Amino acid sequence: MFDAIASRYELVNKLMTFGLDARWRRRAVSDLRLPVASVVLDVAAGTGDFTRELARQGHFAVATDLSYGMLHAGRDVRERVQANAAMLPFRSAGFDGVTCGYALRNFTDLQGTLDEMSRVLRPGGRLSLLEVAEPRSGLWRAGFRLWFRRVVPFIGSLLSDRAAYHYLPQSTAYLPESDEIVRMLNRAGFSAVNHRRVMGGLNQQFLATRSA
Ligand SMILES: C[S@@+](CC[C@H](N)C(=O)[O-])C[C@H]1O[C@@H](n2cnc3c(N)ncnc32)[C@H](O)[C@@H]1O
Protein backbone atom coordinates (compact mmCIF):
# COMPACT_ATOMS: atom_id res chain seq x y z
CA MET A 1 0.00 0.00 0.00
CA PHE A 2 2.76 2.46 0.89
CA ASP A 3 4.56 1.68 -2.38
CA ALA A 4 1.37 2.76 -4.19
CA ILE A 5 1.11 6.15 -2.45
CA ALA A 6 4.84 6.95 -2.23
CA SER A 7 5.07 9.50 -5.06
CA ARG A 8 2.33 11.78 -3.65
CA TYR A 9 2.78 10.93 0.05
CA GLU A 10 4.49 14.18 1.06
CA LEU A 11 2.12 16.37 -0.94
CA VAL A 12 -0.98 14.82 0.66
CA ASN A 13 0.68 15.05 4.10
CA LYS A 14 1.32 18.77 3.69
CA LEU A 15 -2.28 19.39 2.60
CA MET A 16 -3.68 17.23 5.41
CA THR A 17 -1.74 19.08 8.11
CA PHE A 18 -1.58 22.55 6.47
CA GLY A 19 2.18 22.09 6.59
CA LEU A 20 2.15 22.00 10.41
CA ASP A 21 3.79 18.57 10.44
CA ALA A 22 7.14 20.27 9.71
CA ARG A 23 6.91 22.11 13.04
CA TRP A 24 5.87 18.95 14.94
CA ARG A 25 8.75 16.97 13.42
CA ARG A 26 11.28 19.75 14.23
CA ARG A 27 10.23 19.70 17.88
CA ALA A 28 10.23 15.88 18.05
CA VAL A 29 13.84 15.85 16.80
CA SER A 30 15.09 18.68 19.03
CA ASP A 31 13.43 16.97 22.04
CA LEU A 32 15.92 14.11 21.61
CA ARG A 33 18.39 16.54 23.25
CA LEU A 34 21.34 14.79 21.62
CA PRO A 35 24.65 16.48 20.84
CA VAL A 36 25.27 17.46 17.22
CA ALA A 37 26.69 14.62 15.06
CA SER A 38 24.84 11.93 16.96
CA VAL A 39 23.98 8.79 14.99
CA VAL A 40 20.19 8.46 14.78
CA LEU A 41 18.02 5.77 13.21
CA ASP A 42 14.71 6.90 11.70
CA VAL A 43 12.42 3.84 11.87
CA ALA A 44 9.59 3.54 9.31
CA ALA A 45 11.12 6.62 7.75
CA GLY A 46 8.90 6.57 4.68
CA THR A 47 10.04 9.26 2.25
CA GLY A 48 12.37 10.71 4.87
CA ASP A 49 10.69 13.81 6.29
CA PHE A 50 12.09 12.97 9.74
CA THR A 51 15.43 11.82 8.35
CA ARG A 52 16.00 15.17 6.62
CA GLU A 53 15.04 17.05 9.80
CA LEU A 54 17.62 14.99 11.72
CA ALA A 55 20.27 15.95 9.16
CA ARG A 56 19.19 19.63 9.31
CA GLN A 57 19.74 19.53 13.08
CA GLY A 58 23.28 18.24 12.51
CA HIS A 59 22.87 14.51 13.08
CA PHE A 60 24.04 11.57 11.02
CA ALA A 61 20.73 9.96 10.07
CA VAL A 62 19.90 6.51 8.75
CA ALA A 63 16.44 5.84 7.28
CA THR A 64 14.86 2.41 7.42
CA ASP A 65 11.46 1.34 6.12
CA LEU A 66 9.68 -1.80 4.92
CA SER A 67 8.49 -0.09 1.72
CA TYR A 68 11.05 0.15 -1.06
CA GLY A 69 8.76 2.61 -2.88
CA MET A 70 8.67 5.03 0.08
CA LEU A 71 12.46 4.89 0.55
CA HIS A 72 13.01 5.31 -3.20
CA ALA A 73 10.71 8.35 -3.38
CA GLY A 74 12.65 10.10 -0.59
CA ARG A 75 14.77 13.06 -1.66
CA ASP A 76 18.18 13.85 -0.13
CA VAL A 77 18.30 10.77 2.07
CA ARG A 78 21.72 9.18 1.73
CA GLU A 79 21.58 6.19 4.05
CA ARG A 80 18.51 4.04 3.32
CA VAL A 81 17.92 0.47 4.47
CA GLN A 82 14.85 -1.57 3.56
CA ALA A 83 13.85 -3.62 6.60
CA ASN A 84 11.04 -4.74 8.85
CA ALA A 85 11.13 -2.62 12.03
CA ALA A 86 10.42 -5.73 14.10
CA MET A 87 13.67 -7.32 12.84
CA LEU A 88 16.14 -4.48 12.42
CA PRO A 89 19.36 -5.46 10.62
CA PHE A 90 21.60 -3.36 12.90
CA ARG A 91 23.92 -4.34 15.71
CA SER A 92 22.85 -3.80 19.29
CA ALA A 93 23.58 -0.47 21.02
CA GLY A 94 24.83 1.12 17.78
CA PHE A 95 22.66 4.27 17.76
CA ASP A 96 22.51 7.36 19.96
CA GLY A 97 18.89 8.06 19.05
CA VAL A 98 15.83 6.59 17.37
CA THR A 99 12.92 8.49 15.85
CA CYS A 100 9.67 7.17 14.43
CA GLY A 101 6.91 9.32 12.94
CA TYR A 102 3.29 8.37 12.33
CA ALA A 103 3.91 4.63 12.03
CA LEU A 104 3.06 3.11 15.43
CA ARG A 105 -0.45 2.30 14.20
CA ASN A 106 0.95 0.54 11.14
CA PHE A 107 3.15 -1.97 12.95
CA THR A 108 1.58 -5.41 13.21
CA ASP A 109 3.98 -6.24 16.07
CA LEU A 110 4.23 -3.03 18.10
CA GLN A 111 5.86 -4.56 21.19
CA GLY A 112 8.41 -6.41 19.03
CA THR A 113 9.18 -3.16 17.21
CA LEU A 114 9.66 -1.18 20.44
CA ASP A 115 11.92 -4.01 21.68
CA GLU A 116 14.01 -3.64 18.52
CA MET A 117 14.22 0.16 18.89
CA SER A 118 15.49 -0.44 22.43
CA ARG A 119 17.99 -3.08 21.33
CA VAL A 120 19.68 -0.87 18.70
CA LEU A 121 19.97 2.09 21.11
CA ARG A 122 23.00 2.46 23.37
CA PRO A 123 22.27 2.71 27.10
CA GLY A 124 21.26 6.34 27.71
CA GLY A 125 20.23 6.69 24.06
CA ARG A 126 17.11 8.69 23.32
CA LEU A 127 13.82 7.81 21.64
CA SER A 128 11.26 10.19 20.15
CA LEU A 129 7.98 8.91 18.71
CA LEU A 130 5.33 11.07 17.05
CA GLU A 131 1.83 9.82 16.24
CA VAL A 132 -1.62 11.21 15.48
CA ALA A 133 -4.12 11.41 18.33
CA GLU A 134 -7.75 12.37 18.83
CA PRO A 135 -8.40 15.60 20.73
CA ARG A 136 -10.39 15.19 23.95
CA SER A 137 -12.42 18.41 23.96
CA GLY A 138 -15.83 18.23 22.22
CA LEU A 139 -15.75 20.79 19.40
CA TRP A 140 -12.06 20.26 18.57
CA ARG A 141 -12.69 16.50 18.51
CA ALA A 142 -15.74 16.84 16.22
CA GLY A 143 -13.73 19.05 13.84
CA PHE A 144 -10.85 16.58 13.86
CA ARG A 145 -13.15 13.64 13.08
CA LEU A 146 -14.78 15.50 10.19
CA TRP A 147 -11.38 16.45 8.78
CA PHE A 148 -9.62 13.15 9.36
CA ARG A 149 -12.45 10.75 8.47
CA ARG A 150 -14.11 12.68 5.62
CA VAL A 151 -11.82 15.35 4.14
CA VAL A 152 -8.54 13.42 4.28
CA PRO A 153 -9.97 10.38 2.39
CA PHE A 154 -11.46 12.81 -0.14
CA ILE A 155 -8.15 14.65 -0.71
CA GLY A 156 -6.33 11.31 -0.78
CA SER A 157 -8.63 9.85 -3.41
CA LEU A 158 -8.33 12.97 -5.58
CA LEU A 159 -4.54 13.09 -5.48
CA SER A 160 -3.46 9.57 -4.66
CA ASP A 161 -4.86 6.10 -3.89
CA ARG A 162 -8.48 5.98 -2.73
CA ALA A 163 -8.28 2.73 -0.75
CA ALA A 164 -5.09 3.75 1.04
CA TYR A 165 -6.51 7.08 2.22
CA HIS A 166 -9.65 5.35 3.46
CA TYR A 167 -7.55 2.88 5.43
CA LEU A 168 -5.02 5.35 6.87
CA PRO A 169 -7.42 7.44 9.04
CA GLN A 170 -9.11 4.22 10.19
CA SER A 171 -5.77 2.71 11.18
CA THR A 172 -5.77 4.84 14.36
CA ALA A 173 -8.15 2.13 15.67
CA TYR A 174 -5.09 -0.16 15.88
CA LEU A 175 -3.27 2.26 18.15
CA PRO A 176 -3.27 1.24 21.84
CA GLU A 177 -4.14 3.88 24.46
CA SER A 178 -1.20 6.10 25.41
CA ASP A 179 -0.95 4.51 28.90
CA GLU A 180 -0.57 1.10 27.27
CA ILE A 181 2.15 2.42 24.92
CA VAL A 182 3.99 3.82 27.97
CA ARG A 183 3.79 0.36 29.60
CA MET A 184 5.07 -1.26 26.39
CA LEU A 185 8.01 1.18 26.32
CA ASN A 186 8.85 0.29 29.92
CA ARG A 187 8.69 -3.40 29.06
CA ALA A 188 11.03 -2.77 26.10
CA GLY A 189 13.67 -1.37 28.46
CA PHE A 190 13.02 2.38 28.40
CA SER A 191 12.97 4.67 31.43
CA ALA A 192 11.92 8.29 31.98
CA VAL A 193 9.07 7.72 29.54
CA ASN A 194 7.17 10.90 28.88
CA HIS A 195 3.92 11.28 26.93
CA ARG A 196 2.60 14.66 25.83
CA ARG A 197 -0.22 15.84 23.64
CA VAL A 198 0.62 18.30 20.88
CA MET A 199 -1.61 21.11 19.59
CA GLY A 200 -4.74 20.40 21.58
CA GLY A 201 -4.29 16.65 21.16
CA LEU A 202 -4.04 16.44 17.37
CA ASN A 203 -0.71 14.67 17.79
CA GLN A 204 1.00 12.84 20.61
CA GLN A 205 4.66 12.42 21.38
CA PHE A 206 6.52 9.82 23.44
CA LEU A 207 10.02 10.57 24.71
CA ALA A 208 12.11 7.99 26.49
CA THR A 209 15.64 7.04 27.47
CA ARG A 210 17.16 3.59 26.94
CA SER A 211 17.87 2.19 30.39
CA ALA A 212 21.47 1.41 31.29
C1 LIG B 1 2.37 6.90 7.69
S1 LIG B 1 3.94 6.42 7.08
C2 LIG B 1 5.06 7.46 8.00
C3 LIG B 1 6.30 7.78 7.25
C4 LIG B 1 7.26 8.78 7.89
N1 LIG B 1 7.81 8.28 9.13
C5 LIG B 1 6.64 10.12 8.13
O1 LIG B 1 6.80 10.67 9.23
O2 LIG B 1 6.02 10.68 7.21
C6 LIG B 1 4.16 4.84 7.82
C7 LIG B 1 5.41 4.12 7.34
O3 LIG B 1 5.55 2.93 8.10
C8 LIG B 1 6.15 1.96 7.27
N2 LIG B 1 5.97 0.64 7.87
C9 LIG B 1 4.81 -0.02 8.15
N3 LIG B 1 5.08 -1.21 8.73
C10 LIG B 1 6.43 -1.30 8.81
C11 LIG B 1 7.32 -2.30 9.33
N4 LIG B 1 6.86 -3.43 9.87
N5 LIG B 1 8.64 -2.06 9.26
C12 LIG B 1 9.13 -0.91 8.73
N6 LIG B 1 8.35 0.05 8.22
C13 LIG B 1 7.01 -0.14 8.26
C14 LIG B 1 5.42 2.15 5.94
O4 LIG B 1 6.10 1.56 4.85
C15 LIG B 1 5.35 3.68 5.87
O5 LIG B 1 6.43 4.22 5.16
Image: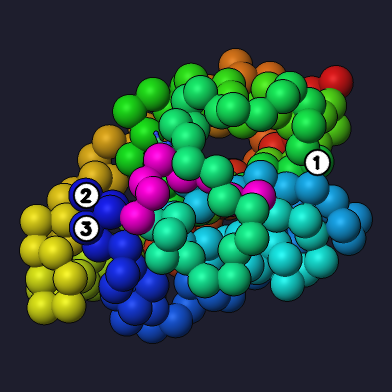
Q: For mark 3, give the secondary structure.
A: helix
Residue 1, labelled with which disc?
2
Give the number of the disc on residue 96.
Answer: 1
- Name the residue nearer the viewer: 112 or 6: 6
Q: Provide residue 211's location: percent of width, then percent of height.
A: 79, 23
Under mark 3, the amino acid is: Ala
Q: Earlier in the sequence, mark 3 or mark 1?
A: 3
Relative to 149, residue 40 above or below: above
Among the 4 quarters of the image, the one containing residue 31: bottom right
Q: Are marks 3 and 2 in contact (CB under 8 Å)?
A: yes
Residue occupied by mark 3: 4
Specify whether 203 is left or right of 207. Answer: left
Q: Position of residue 109 (x, y in %)?
A: 39, 24
Check the picture and name the quadrant holding the C terminus. Answer: top right
Circle 1: is it few (<14), some (14-19), or many (20+) Cα within 10 Å? many
Task: Using the numbered discs, state the Cα–Cα distance from disc 1 to disc 2 in whole angstroms.
Answer: 31 Å
Magenta residue span: 62-69
Element under disc 1: strand
Residue 112 shows which numbered tag? none
Position of 106 relative to 19 (above/below): above
Q: Quadrant of residue 192?
A: top right
Q: Amino acid at mark 1?
A: Asp
The mark lying in front, picked from 1 and 2, is: 2
Of mark 1 and mark 2, the one earlier in the sequence is 2
Left or right position of 1 against 196: left
Q: Residue at left 77%, top 37%? A: 95
* Residue 35 as seen in the image, left or right of residue 186: right
Residue 93, how many percent across, how many down? 78, 26
Q: Amino acid at mark 2?
A: Met
